[in-house]
Every structure is written in structure tokens, then in C-alpha cells.
Image: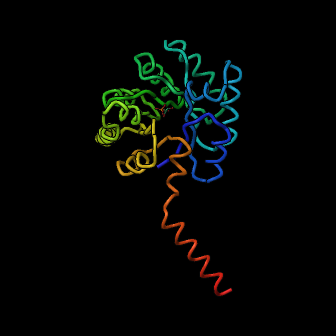
């Protein structure tokens, strides 16, 4: 399972990268705004800065909502750096743009996916990644993990190459359950990655080992 971090915060990306388990980064316009990155030039530079920290894929989202605008913007984003994946919204023009890019070998991430039918369309359009937002489904009392399982079954039935990128991850249990289902990727906050480290018995055991060592040395 690949681990992506879902942030535009460079310090957090560096911290996850230093841990040695990071496979990529996802961003979105809200995450960019949260870091105070505004204006086209600053946003494009920030994507390059992120690419220079990590070795894996970096999703950069288009703002246009029409086919021509998405193609223009997506081509500009893709030309920034070989690690860039063009992130497209799950709307009709987004699917058309996804097909356009996949036909030309440009990698895509279809975002804002909330149903198995949407995920099926994204795969048919040749998406590299599909991003079901499981946390936002959980927020409205709908089982987000069930959606991940449905997409896994559909993609396996037809051997689609599209990778399931479980998004809107909120905590460690989301990560673990997605891994059990067989999600290809998860993208979450740094806390969802670092949280996997924690177990009190590890801390107790290590303290005991060190204390016993001290007794004999
Ligand atoms: C995915 O690519 C999105 O950036 C993200 O996972 C959305 O998560 P949120 O629901 O926590 O905003």
C-alpha cells in the first residue's frame, strides 16, 4: 500500500519524507489556501517545491471546470515536473479531460468521488488514480469504507489498472481498514501516518530493555 500525505505544508511533507515511508503527496485548492499559497505563480512554484522534497507522485488540482480549461491547465501543471499528476474533478468535463490526458500518457487523479458508479467511470476514462473521499462519507453517516470495498471488487472484476487512492482519511483506523480491503494508496494527514507508530507496550517494553541493560553495564 502506498502512503501519500494530504497536505501542502512543506514542513510536514519533509517530516513524512524523513520517516522513509512516503510515496507521494496530494494537494487540493483548500490545502493550498490553508498554507497561504495564493496566486497562480506562487501555486505553481509550490508544486515544484513539493516535487523537490518527495520522490513519488504529487497531485496538482485544476481549477477550471470546463473541458478546454482543464486541458489547458492540466497540460501546464503536467509540464511543471515529471512527478505531477493532474487532479480532475468527478464531473462530465473532468471525465472527458481524464480520457484526453490518459490517451496522451499524462497521469491523472479523479477526485471528489463518492460512489462506485463514479469510480467505474473514472476507470473507464483511464484514470491513473481514483480518489474516494471516505472521511466525508463517514461525516454524513454513510460507510466510507464500504465504498472502498465496492470499488476494489469492481476494479478486480475487470482488472482495471486505475489505482484506488483512499482519500479524506481522518485517522489510523481508516488506514488499517483500507489496507485490509486492499486499497492501493491512502492519502491522509501526517497524524494518520505517525499514529501508526504508537503502542504503549512498545514504550513499556523498550523502557524495560534499557533499564535491564543498565543493570548489567
Ligand atoms: C484528496 O485528495 C483530498 O485532498 C482530501 O483527502 C480531502 O480530505 P478532507 O475531507 O479531509 O478535506
In this rendering, the answer to whether 167 lies above or below 80 is below
Query: Which of these two is toward me, 37 or 46?
Result: 37
Asked whether, in this view, residue 142 is left or right of residue 197, the answer is left
- Residue 173 in the image: x percent, y percent? 41, 49
Find the residue positioned furthest to the bottom: 216
The structure residue drawn at horizontal position 40% and vertical position 31%, both measured from the top left corner, is 136
The structure residue drawn at horizontal position 39% and vertical position 28%, both measured from the top left corner, is 113
- Residue 36 in the image: x percent, y percent? 66, 25
The structure residue drawn at horizontal position 59% and vertical position 42%, both measured from the top left corner, is 56
The number of numbered badges drawn on the structure is 0
The structure residue drawn at horizontal position 43% and vertical position 39%, both measured from the top left corner, is 166
- Residue 37 in the image: x percent, y percent? 67, 25
Query: Which of these two is toward me, 84 or 30?
Result: 30
Image quadrant where one finds the C terminus: bottom right
Toward which corner of the image does residue 203 lie, by quadrant? bottom right
Asked whether, in this view, residue 79 is left or right of residue 200, the answer is right
In this rendering, the answer to whether 183 lies above or below 75 is below
In this rendering, the answer to whether 73 lies above or below 117 is above
- Rendered image coloring scheme: rainbow
In this rendering, the answer to whether 138 lies above or below 210 is above
- Residue 28 in the image: x percent, y percent? 55, 28
Toward which corner of the image does residue 212 lie, by quadrant? bottom right
Amino acid at each position: 500500500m502506498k502512503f501519500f500525505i494530504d497536505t501542502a505544508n512543506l514542513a510536514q511533507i519533509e517530516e513524512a519524507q524523513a520517516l522513509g515511508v512516503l510515496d507521494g503527496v496530494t494537494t487540493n485548492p483548500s490545502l493550498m489556501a490553508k498554507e497561504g499559497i495564493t496566486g497562480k505563480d506562487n501555486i505553481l512554484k509550490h508544486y515544484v517545491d513539493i516535487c523537490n522534497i518527495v520522490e513519488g507522485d504529487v497531485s496538482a488540482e485544476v481549477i477550471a471546470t470546463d473541458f478546454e480549461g482543464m486541458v489547458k491547465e492540466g497540460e501546464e501543471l503536467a509540464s511543471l515536473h515529471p512527478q505531477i499528476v493532474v487532479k480532475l474533478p468527478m464531473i462530465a468535463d473532468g471525465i472527458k479531460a481524464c480520457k484526453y490526458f490518459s490517451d496522451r500518457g499524462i497521469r491523472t487523479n479523479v477526485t471528489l468521488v463518492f460512489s462506485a458508479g463514479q469510480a467505474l467511470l473514472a476507470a473507464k476514462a483511464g484514470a491513473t488514480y481514483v480518489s474516494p473521499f471516505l472521511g466525508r462519507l463517514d461525516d454524513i453517516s454513510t460507510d466510507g469504507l464500504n465504498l472502498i470495498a465496492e470499488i476494489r471488487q469492481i476494479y478486480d472484476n475487470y482488472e482495471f489498472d486505475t489505482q484506488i487512492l483512499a482519500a479524506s482519511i481522518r485517522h489510523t483506523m481508516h488506514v488499517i481498514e483500507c489496507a485490509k480491503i486492499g486499497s492501493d494508496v491512502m492519502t491522509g494527514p501526517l497524524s494518520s501516518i505517525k499514529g501508526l507508530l504508537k503502542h504503549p507496550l512498545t514504550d513499556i517494553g523498550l523502557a524495560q530493555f534499557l533499564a535491564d541493560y543498565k543493570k548489567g553495564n
